[in-house]
Image (cartoon, rainbow, N blue to C red):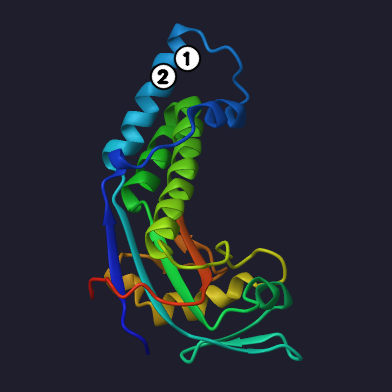
Amino acid sequence: MNDLYIIHANSHDIKINTTALLRRLKISNPDESMQQLIRECINTVYDNASLRAVYTVGNIDINKDENIIDFGYMRLKSCNLRVNLADCNKAFVFVATLGIEIDRIIERYSKVLQTKALICDTVALFLIEAFCDYIEALLTKRIKSKKRFSPGYGDLDITCQRDIIQNLDTARRIGVTLTDSCMMIPTKSVSAIIGVKKRDGRTKKA
């Protein structure tokens, strides 16, 4: 197994697109009370998020005929991933999370303040994607790379998260586990693969 590395980030250093957030919420002209509620939800998510990720990087071997990508510590079968990793001989694999407190907040609000729960949930979705963008930019700075590719997209089966979660030791390192249906807990977590042609050696071992 390759070495594992940890990334921590301050949520307040990660920016989300508030215009896109309003579009997702289908709110075009929020009044003052709605603007205040949205600000409160953004602050709640940002203040309670614990942004952490674990990743590894190493050589990959691609079998084009069988659509199998061999990472050394796991083998994934996917035509779409194989195409995404074309011309790559290395890959980053990472899991990122906002932490369990966000799930608890959304669950608590869903029982009494459903609008607030919906807004917090949407803010959290935007924040985890922005965190993944941050990770991708950090890992691939000054190197050639492909856009990240996640389980459940195309023909890369969601069940491959079992291999990713196990090999990245996410339960112990960042508190991410899987349900029987291969959904991650905390729910605001993402796993992804980034194909690269060379490695940035400046990393901190976990």
1 or 187: nearer the viewer: 1
Q: Nearer the viewer, residue 83 or 132?
A: 83
Considering depth in this image, is 41 or 131 the residue closer to the camera? 131
Q: Which residue is drawn at 65% across and 74% down?
A: 81
Q: How crowded is mark 2: few (under 14 residues within 10 Å), some or many (20 or more)?
A: some
Q: In which quarter of the image is the C terminus?
A: bottom left
Q: Position of residue 155 (x, y in %)?
A: 72, 71
Q: Which amino acid does label 2 sit on?
A: Leu
Query: Callout 1: 10 Å neighbours few (<14), some, many (20+)?
Result: few
Residue at 63% from the left image edge and 25% from the top image edge: 26
Q: In this view, does 41 lie to the left or right of 162?
A: left
**Residue at the spot 65% in from the left edge and 77% down from the top edge:** 86
Q: Mark 2 points at which residue?
A: 37
**Is residue 186 among what the camera can see?**
no
Q: Report whether 188 appears left or right of 201.
A: right
Task: Please provide percent x and percent y for residue 76.
Answer: 60, 83
In contact (CB < 8 Å): disc 2 and disc 1: yes
> Which residue shows up at 57% across the image and 77% down it?
160
Q: Mark 1 points at which residue?
A: 34
Which corner quadrant holds the N terminus?
bottom left
Mark 1, secondary structure of its residue: helix
How far apart are the two marked residues, 2 and 1, measured between alpha carbons?
A: 5 Å
